Image (tube, rainbow, N blue to C red):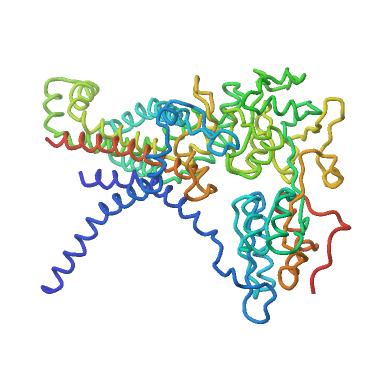
Amino acid sequence: MRRIEPLIEAVVHICGFSAVFFVIAIFWFVFEEGASFLWNTLDWGQFLGSIEWYPSSESNRRYGALAMIVGTLSVTMLAMAIAVPFGLGGAIFVSEFSSGRTREVLKVVIELLAAIPSVVWGFIGLMLINPLIMSVFDAPMGLNVLNGALLLALMSVPIMVSIGEDALKAVPDSYREAAEAMGATRWQVVWRVLLPAARNGLLAAVLLGVGRAIGETMAVLMATGHAIHIPTSPLDSVRTLTATIAAELGETARGSDHYQVLFVIGMLLFTMTFAINLIADLTIKGVRR
Amino acid sequence: MTAQRSLLALLSLPLIGGLLLTACGEGNRGRSASDEVKPGDAGGKVTIQNKGSDTMVNIAQAWAETYNKARPQVAIAVSGGGSGTGIAALLNKTVDIANSSRELKAEEKEKIKQASGKDPVEHTVAYDALAIYVHKDNPLQKITKEQLAGIYAEKGTTELWADLGVTIPGCTDGKIVRISRQNNSGTYEYFREWTLGKGDFKLGSRDMQGSKDVVDTVSQAPCAIGYSGMGYKNDTVRWVGVTTSADAPGVEPSVTTVHDKTYPISRALYMTTAGEVSGESARYLQWIQSAEGQKIVETNGFVPLPTDQIKPAPQ
């Protein structure tokens, strides 16, 4: 046993560091595939400032990603506007207002919600929410920002509930007891004591939800209508960055400008999710202190 | 806190996984390096190199797989890249059969003749037709090429169904909802070429991932118009007759109108060889043009050859 101990230790070490290796390797892969286009050809002004996305034009190729950036942000923001109240409300209810059987059942069901594959969510958007939006809002198409945002909200609520609940549980019971001893109602305890005390953890829960929403591909590809368009209302169709990569990469010639610009979009997404996850991680660290 | 850490890693997985998967899909299509293999060599395994039109990649793949099952000693390596790529490869003698969704240009014929000493032969293997789909409640009977360009072109100004003289029950705001395809599909390119030549589509169309998605979307949206293969018609959508001039009546797509070339948005699909081929390549082409090969044409949403052009199955 003594002799194999260092071996096991080494294996565990490798397992631990492999995650770092994979992140770096993936970043390198994405960067390398798009690098020559990024340095030599890409017109940043056009990429970030124009909506004209014509990567396969015969006469005039243009690579403007603005509509997709705005599309991603609009779907994510609307999703968060729907998901944050539900997610945090759910976390407060599970952590503070439910107990015993109810609480166990709720936790299991919410975790089940997180386990539904995104392509199934996409089907729900296409087949169920699409006609629903058309009849409720009398819209010409039900594949739009609202549809995508509803799906993303449903997908990120479970994350917010479980992490939010962890954060609320991390607040020491002595806080609650002290507040109740002062004669505070349960609502006052939540609003005045728990929410401020768990602020960082709840913020991290929200940011992780945002990260989930930005990176999601399949559901938004199917539900947002996939139209290059700056939305002026939640009932407009949009196209997201992730959906563009998923839709176009499969059939582009390897190494072509079109192929490479899709990898530049990948880098942009990587940077966005990385920044959000980093902020979330730092806020979680904040809660420890 | 560790639970949150691993959650962080998990959250970034879908994005990364998606990137990797789509990237890997690209590598499988390559041409095997057996350029030296002459079709018809006695004994051993024969590989027929087949390259060209992206429109035809799926059907060429389906032909190759079915044929290979029946005749395992012949493997067919199929790859895309476009009609021009396939013809160039035929010219460089790196393929045996080039797939092309257009006729050869005169200079291409000349070059192939110079390179190989033989006249190229274009074997018609199927027809491709795009139908214009609208919702079943849409009363539009006829649409001209010019009107389609007005709706779809980058500089086109047709935004309302009223501009085409129709009102559709259930389409409240009267705006035309354009359904299109993702910008690297062969269908997208053919429709763009037919309506707009070298021009580009107007932004803001809903770009679907497949021919069937286009029809499904049109069937749900009364304001919509879309283009797709003929194989997807059902009771919830209608075809609009197409014409190139305003005075002529609209022609609906059908096997007959495609064969007699009266339906305008249709084209023949060719498999081109340098000279008349013999051996395995000839046998393969004959099989494609036989009843069995033409059945695959229909299941892939294309139009099969007229009955009198169907060849007997090779022995």
Q: Residue at x 43, y 38 (%)?
A: A41
Direction from residue B254 to residue B194 in the image, left or right? left
Would you identify the image quadrant in which residue B295 lies? bottom right
Toward the front, the furthest residue is B114
Instruction: Give x and y (percent) for residue A36.
Output: 39, 44
Is residue B315 placed above or below A165 in the rendered structure?
below
The image shows residue B145, relative to residue B289, as above or below, that is above
Q: Position of residue A213 (x, y in %)?
A: 39, 36
Residue found at the very far right of the displayed protein? B308
Q: Which residue is depicted at the point 40% across and 39% down?
A: A40
Q: Is residue B141 left or right of residue B281?
A: right
- Locate the C terminus of chain B by quadrant: bottom right
Taking the image as shown, residue A279 lies to the left or right of residue B256, namely left
- In front: B201, or A159? B201
Say whether residue A137 is visible: yes
Question: Of B292 and A94, which appears nearest the observer?
Answer: B292
